Amino acid sequence: MNFKGSLKAAIYFCSLLSFTFIFGCNNVENDKLDIKEYLKHANGNTIYPSEKQIEMLKKVIPNEAFQPAPKISDRTFWNEVAQTESGKTYLKKALSFLNEAPEVPISDDIYRRANKEGNRAIYKPRYYDTMIRLEHFILAECLENNGRFVPQIRVYLRAIMDMKSWLHPNHDDRNNSVLEGKRVSIDLGARRFGSVLAVAETLLENQLSPEFRNEIKAQLQYRITDNYLQSCKTPDKNNHWIDGKSNWNAVCTSGAVFTSIANATDAEERIAAIGSAINSMKHYVSGFGADGYCSEGVGYWRYGFGHYLYLAEILFDYTDGKINLFEGHDPDKLNRVADFPENFHIQNEKFAPFADGSSIVKNNEGNFAYVLAAKQYGARKPIENILDQAVEQLIVWKNPEDFTTRKTTNSKTFVVPNHSYFNDFGMVISRGKQNVPFSVAVKAGHNKENHNHSDVGTYILVLGEDLISGDIGAPSYRAGSFSPTNKARSSWGHPVPIIDHTLQSNGRQFEGKITETKFTDIEDKVVMDISAAYELPMLESLSRTMTNDKSGAGTISIQDDFKTSKPVVFGTAIMTFSEYEIVDESTIMLIGKNQKVKVEISSSGGKVVINPEPVPVEYLREGKGAVRIGVDFEKPIASGSISVKYTPIF
């Protein structure tokens, strides 16, 4: 072949190669589900997928059921895991449980009592201890493969299948109709029981008899898959969470979908379960602020968003990346949600206990949300991986290189910023940088947040490690804890004004708006209009100003300015678990576990008086002995201000 011929052939070959590469890449891209486009074809607000959505899903979902990990007969995989430190630790823990009997079923009497009293302590440890042990037995048997865990596995599986209800008793209705066999429902407990049984059935093969495996599959089909898909088709009281914005949606959906795609023999049902989940997760993600703010607090972020990521991981694995909920329909927002804990952290591992959030995150309950947020979004890696479910452990064992920690990799030093501003929800954290840092978190928000408290304008002060004053957090979950008359849930139990004997109202329209901010190295200032939180026609204006003077030891002030069309009784409150001493009519000393603060009260428009009284709620998550120290005008006035200034004393 001459030079021209060779050149022509080369050009043709390169063109063909380029065409093939580009066309092939486009095909790969086209194989992926466009979730934003998918959501456009939903049948109104129906969670169950439309015909068009099912058509789209069939192109990306395998025909076979989901296999969460290699079966026990794959000795290459399991022997490799057994040789790792993680595998050895897991086996050791499983052996420590080996002589323990299952703690379910609980008696009908205990179930009914827990339902009536809302007392979780009399059943919840029994439920979760049983599930945790069974998960360890299953995976330990896969690691060891010599049969010594099999008898206990069978005993535990039988105990769970003999339960009349898999629900937390306080999630049943007042007539205990699930216990009575009149209906079936999925909650935070039922989805976990279902997942554990599905793991056993998919991994253990002939360690369980065919008859036993069929019984497991039948119960999972009835209790989880059939029930879930029916509620997705027609909303009912059985599964009210399917279009919710709280952690319930992500947690229950992830469990229902895992069980369904691993257990259901009908491919159409597996497709429907996944399609329903994608439609449902649009609602869950909408519960976060555009700024990534989680109004449920960092504990429920860990629980809810952790299960969203768990769902995303199993669907990504099952479809070989063709369904990517890590990006979802709004990848930028999901990135901000993933960064929420870092931005919400105040100092010294303390968080604002707003709504039903907690000031401390208990990592012993698992940190898989942090693990996956680090992997998928580049969030800060946890110091260690703490996995509290078998499926989480399987995900990590399958891809250990994806789940390194700060202990095993070089990580940049993390510098906490001077402030965080969630401008969509209206929440600011102003951080002091003193040797004993003095910081404040303050929230405008609205009164229809997830796990809502009537708390527009609330705040929390942290001095060192002490939550010295401010929001006292949530009542413990018992009977009456969610009642609107519970004083820890109403605005009476928050450091916000009471006007004309009237508390804040509940609803989305009752909100606060941040109207001014100033952030500098030496001072932060936030002004918010909180007048809309009150249904008072005579209220013309109500603003709250937070000023954090970071000079010296620091000084934080909260000032309320109001104006009404007629004289009203007006007061605010200092909320605290600290010991207190009223020094004089305008000075209070707060004594925390480690720190001490002087509180100076000033006013304009009239004289104020100090009225302390205990918070009449026996069980509070943040502690005991909460006090509401009222700061009230002595006489009705039509305009005025109250300033509360906090200064550390060393």
Image (cartoon, rainbow, N blue to C red):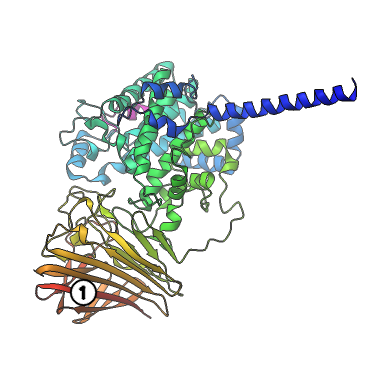
In the rendered image, is residue 452 in sight?
A: yes
Dividing the image into 4 quarters, which one contains the C terminus? bottom left
In the rendered image, is residue 497 in sight?
A: no
The magenta segment is 156-166
Q: Is residue 229 magenta?
A: no
Most extreme residue toward the front, as rendered? 4
- The residue drawn where x is 29% and y is 69% is 545
Figure check: 261 above or below 515: above
Figure check: 546 above or below 62: below
Q: Looking at the image, which is closer to me, 424 or 169?
A: 424
In the figure, is residue 3 to the left or right of 431?
right
Can you give x and y, in whole percent of width and height, for residue 72 in the image? 53, 26
Can you give x and y, in whole percent of width and height, for residue 242 in the image? 31, 34
Can you give x and y, in whole percent of width and height, for residue 49 in the image? 36, 25
Q: Quadrant of residue 411?
A: bottom right
Label 1: element kind: strand
At label 1, counting other C-alpha atoms closer than 10 Å, the crowd grade (few under 14, some 14-19, many 20 or more) is: many
Most extreme residue toward the bottom, as rendered? 584
Q: Is residue 164 magenta?
A: yes
- The residue drawn where x is 49% and y is 35% is 324
Dividing the image into 4 quarters, which one contains the N terminus? top right
Figure check: 389 above or below 55: below
- Count the marks: how many? 1
Q: For mark 1, what is the residue? A: 641
In the figure, is residue 560 to the left or right of 342?
left
Q: Quadrant of residue 558?
A: bottom left
The amino acid on which the numbered mark 1 sits, given as a three-letter code, is Ser
Can you give x and y, in whole percent of width and height, for residue 624 in the image? 25, 62
